[in-house]
Amino acid sequence: MTIEENVLLAPYTTLKIGGPARYFAKVATEDELVEAVRFARGLGLPLFVLGGGSNLVVADRGFDGLVVQIAITGKVFAGSASGSTMRILFQVPAGIDWDTFVAIACEAGYAGVECLAGIPGTVGGSPVQNIGAYGQEVSQTIHTVRVFDLEAHDFVDLSAKECEFGYRRSIFNTSQRGRFVVTRVVFEFDLDTLVRLNYEDLKRHFGDKPNPRPLEVYRAVREIRAGKGMLIDPETAGPDERSAGSFFKNPVVSTRVVTDILETLAPDEGTMPQWPTDDGKVKLAAAWLIEHSGFKKGYAQGRVGISSRHTLALINRTGDATCDELLRLRDLIVLTVEQRFGVTLAMEPVMLG
């Protein structure tokens, strides 16, 4: 393992924004991870774990610590769960590309992650944010997460329950932020589970076709994401793809807030998308709130803007934008939506520095 100094982080992010890390190390094994942690502790440095850089905003001043890029790869191992013939476990190294794993599971015919196709990043990052799309969340198939506990300085396996998953949250980005480093994720699939098409985009795509195969849904989701500029290919990325994906979380509000909003809508503003949650609240579409606050697709503010194909994606339009410019646009959108609807949008990507 080599530890480099003053490494620019922008190239390691899909936004292509951000300053340097004081130290940078790419770790390919768990032993190398332990070595990197010892290095950071020896110098009293903060440590940040980097995956695919797809859900990350790096400050212009960079990070005055050690950035560890998890590059632990290898074979994806599949085996029966607890001797049962109806469930199967996939053990997946954290450094494996997320979409690559989804393709493997779908090609094998297992339903459960097909709607998460095309999401950039690595397997290790998937439980941290509890990634989700088109009615699925990764927590629905996670069995255990192997982590390095920075407090106990040891490897442990956390059950899905111990991860305390919620909407775009887990202990890894809330109560225990900074304590654990994910090195492997074990997924569990029920062989009797059928594909569920919960979102209109997918229902329209398949029409009346009953029970499409997971691989068919995988391909459809990638096609839909590509049409919205949310399928990021580093080799061909244009302005719409220089983003961190969805920049804002869909807000969850009380029914009273929904009633207040509906009372303010003009007849020509259409129907506001909303979905009930298990705890009696309502999830709203952040994209709809943003659009109806005056920020349309393709909105530009200097070198940053909104994707021409997806309202939730803030983009580095010119390729040389700064983090400060991006955050000024973020703050303007948050303030305007708050003034218009009384709803405060929360940023989804991780902020470093």
Image (cartoon, rainbow, N blue to C red):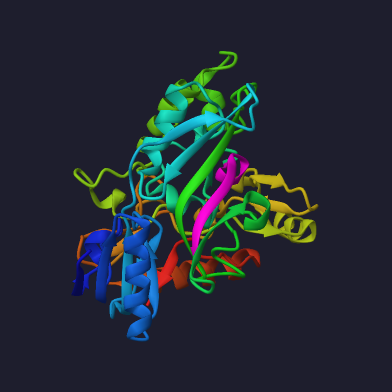
* Residue numbers of the magenta segment: 137-148
Task: State the image coordinates of residue 10 (x, y, percent, origin top left).
Answer: 24, 65
Q: Is residue 173 magenta?
A: no
Q: Nearer the viewer, residue 208 or 244?
A: 244
Up/down of 123 relative to 89, above or below: below
Where residue 64 appears, x then y in whole percent?
Answer: 31, 82
Q: Taking 179 as reference, is 22 above or below it?
A: below
Classify residue 315 by image quadrant. bottom left
Q: Nearer the viewer, residue 75 or 61?
A: 75
Asked whether residue 139 is drawn in magenta, I would say yes
Looking at this rendering, what residue extends furthest in the top direction?
209
Can the viewer see residue 20 in this picture? Answer: no
In what quadrant of the picture does the N terminus appear?
A: bottom left
Answer yes or no: is residue 298 visible. Answer: yes
Q: Relative to 46, is 167 above or below?
A: above
By secondary structure, the bulk of the magenta-drawn segment is best described as strand
Horizontal and vertical percent for residue 300? 32, 61
Q: Going 32% across and 85% down the picture, which residue do you hit? A: 43
Q: Quadrant of residue 100?
A: top left
Q: Residue furthest bottom?
A: 44
In the foreground, 94 or 299: 94
